[in-house]
Image (cartoon, rainbow, N blue to C red):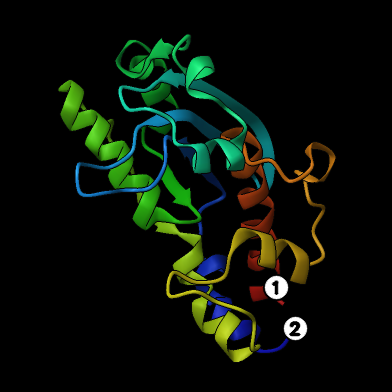
Amino acid sequence: MKYPELLWVFSQLPDHYVVLDTETTGLPDEKSLPDIIALGITVVNDRSIVNAIEFSTRPQRTVSKEAEAIHGVSHEQASGFNTFDSQWPEIAAWFHNQLVVIHNASFDWPVLQNHLHRYGLEQPNISGVFCSQKAAIPWADANNLECSYRGPSLDSLTKILDIEDLRKEIKGVHGAKIDSQQTACVVEKLGRLASK
C-alpha cells in the first residue's frame, strides 16, 4: 500500500494500551443511546496482544432483532447477565492509566459514558481515547479504499492489510472480545506500515 506517511499517528502510539469494543442492544434512537450487552478489552504490550477479556452485561433496553443478527445475543440471553454497575469495578481496573483505542470511538465511547452517568459510576484515570477508524481516513482515502464518513471499516482494513480474520471460524458473528482483538491486530499492522 502507498502513502505510509499518512499513518504516522499509528507509529506514535505507546507500547502499552488497551483496545475497547462493545456490542449493544442496537443503534441510538430518539429515546436514548443503546445499552451495552458485551464489553471486550484487549491489552497490547510491546506491540503484542497479551490478554483479552469480555464482560457480558444485562441491558435495561430490549435487544433489537437487527442487533441480534450482528452479534447473536438474544434479549432472553442478555437478561440473564450480571448488571453493568455490578461489574464496573473489575472493568474499570483494565483502563487505569491506559490509552483506550477504539475502532469506532464516536459510537462506543459515548455509550460507555452514558452508562457511567446513568449508574453514577466514576471513570478511571485514563491517558486518552484514540479512534483508529478516524485516524486511518487520510491513508484509506489516498489509497482509494472504501470509507464511510466514519472511516474504513474493521472488516475492510482486515482484508486490505491481509490480516487473519478472527471471526471467520464463527461465520462473521461480531463479539466484543474478538472485535477488540481484531482491532489490535489492525492497529499494530498500521503502526508497522507507518514505521517503514
- Comparing 59 with 65, the one in front is 65
Disc 1: CA contacts within 10 A as few (<14), some (14-19) or many (>=20): many
Classify residue 55 as left or right of residue 85.
right
What kind of element bears circle 1?
helix
Residue at image mark 2: 1
Q: In which quarter of the image is residue 126?
A: top left
Residue 14 locus on image (x, y percent) = 51, 53
Query: Is residue 169 shown above or below 158?
Result: above
Query: Is residue 128 shown above or below 162?
Result: above
Q: Earlier in the sequence, mark 2 or mark 1?
A: 2
- Comparing 85 with 129, the one in front is 85
Query: Is residue 64 shown above or below 28?
Result: above
Q: Dots 2 and 1: beta carbons under 8 Å?
A: yes
Q: Is residue 134 in view from this perspective?
A: yes
Image quadrant holding the C terminus, namely: bottom right
Residue at image mark 1: 193
Residue 183 locus on image (x, y percent) = 61, 51
